Image: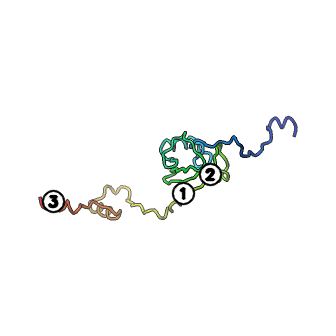
């Protein structure tokens, strides 16, 4: 390699080893971004501010620090992810390295086939009639039933 090409490309990269100066804690938003749980650091900050991130059971601010052994709960797309911090990462890393930085205790997501069927009404059908409303209520497992005590009170009056 010539001197000019070394200048353009910089010094050879040497894999970084764990050192004494490695951090013992890191901000929650930085860690979530670095282990690829969110796409951007600003998205991680927004999730913290919205209350979607909890550390050891308490709501986390973006600037809260994490240490090895902390448990993080992250709400993503309506589902909770339960993670335990195994390694502190400050910079975003590849997916294989990121997987070693946490242990995932999340329950498996339910299959879309397990979801209840949605009630479909044709467009332009308008409001349901009383009869249709009762049928819909019965189908949905609810209904506007009067309690037995209020029925007795009405009959006595």
- Residue at image x 58%, y 56%? 104
Q: Earlier in the sequence, mark 3 or mark 2?
A: 2
Disc tally is 3
**Taking 96 as reference, is 123 left or right?**
left
Tell me residue 64's x, y (percent): 54, 41
Tell me residue 81's x, y (percent): 53, 53
Tell me residue 95's x, y (percent): 65, 52
- Residue at image x 82%, y 35%? 7
Kindly check if marks 2 and 1 are in contact, taking CB atoms under 8 A apart as contact: no
Label 2: element kind: loop
> In front of the other: label 3 or label 1?
1
- Residue at image x 50%, y 54%? 79
Q: Earlier in the sequence, mark 3 or mark 1?
A: 1
Residue at numbered disc 3? 154
Q: Is residue 142 above or below residue 33?
A: below
Residue at numbered disc 2? 86
Residue at numbered disc 1? 106
- Residue at image x 57%, y 47%? 38
**Label 3 – label 1 distance at C-alpha:** 51 Å
**140 or 63, which lies in front?**
63
Label 1: element kind: loop
């Amino acid at each position: 390699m010539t001197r000019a090409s070394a200048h353009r490309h910089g010094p050879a990269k040497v894999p970084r080893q764990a050192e004494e100066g490695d951090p013992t804690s890191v901000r929650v938003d930085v860690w979530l971004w670095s282990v690829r749980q969110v796409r951007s650091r600003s998205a991680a900050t927004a999730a913290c501010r919205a209350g979607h991130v909890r550390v050891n059971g308490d709501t986390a601010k973006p600037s809260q620090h994490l240490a090895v052994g902390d448990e993080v709960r992250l709400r993503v797309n309506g589902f909770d992810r339960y993670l335990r911090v195994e390694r502190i990462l400050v910079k975003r890393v590849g997916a294989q390295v990121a997987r070693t930085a946490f242990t995932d205790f999340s329950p498996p997501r339910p299959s879309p086939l397990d979801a209840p069927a949605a009630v479909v009404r044709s467009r332009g059908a308008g409001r349901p009639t009383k009869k249709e409303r009762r049928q819909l209520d019965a189908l949905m497992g609810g209904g506007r039933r009067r309690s037995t005590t209020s029925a007795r009170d009405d009959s006595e009056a």
